[in-house]
Amino acid sequence: MDLIAVGETAPPFCLPDSWHSEVCIEAFRGRWVILYFYPKDNTTGCTLEAQTFSAEMSDFRGMNTIVIGISPDSCESHEKFMKKHSLDLILLSDETHVVLEKYGVWQKKKLYGREYFGVDRTTYLINPEGVIVEVWPKVKVKGHAEEVKAKVVSLAGNNPE
């Protein structure tokens, strides 16, 4: 499945968070949503990505923006990951890959000649009406949270500084 295009409505979903509470994307209508998909808790790139988004949370809150990370890890893995790195964001578990597939990020990959399915690191920016306004495919972690923040500032027009 392809990534969802800019201008499309973000597909609805509900998934469990780090503490097994159900979180539905529709609950965030009226707010900007940074929805990022990542491969695995406690790996170098994924940890850096979560930490950099987490470090920007006070600014994001000031811009009426929520940050949600989704991976195929379990709720228990997310809980440990959140505690270990003092993360300040929402992490959702998609162990069955339903939402990962719906958003087009569960893709065939190749490593050392071996094919497998995994998460293609992707970020979506969703406006308060629930429409996707920006997509970052094949994300490179370094500088990504700052780039997303700059985009929220340019679109929302409310710089927190």
Image (cartoon, helix red, strand yellow):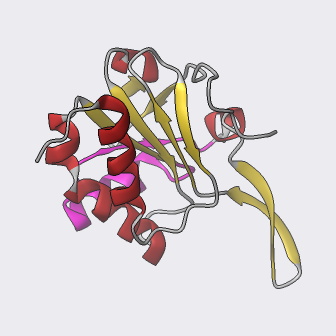
What residue is shown at x 64% (from left), y 41% (from top)? Answer: 100
Q: Is residue 120 left or right of residue 143?
A: right
x then y, percent, for residue 34: 41, 39
Work out whether 42 lies above or below 86: below
Whole-percent x and y of residue 147? Answer: 40, 56
Look at 69% across and 32% down and name the residue there: 102
Work out which quarter of the rendered image holds the N terminus and state it.
Answer: top right
Give the residues in magenta. Answer: 71-95
Q: Is residue 89 visible?
A: yes
Snapshot quadrant of residue 156: top left
Q: Nearer the viewer, residue 20 or 31?
A: 31
Question: Residue 2, located in which quarter of the rendered image?
Answer: top right
Q: In front here: 63 or 158?
A: 158
Depicted 24 relative to depicted 19: above or below: above
Q: Is residue 76 above or below residue 140?
A: above
Image spot of residue 151 (x, y percent): 39, 44
Q: Name, please, the residue furthest toward the bottom.
A: 112
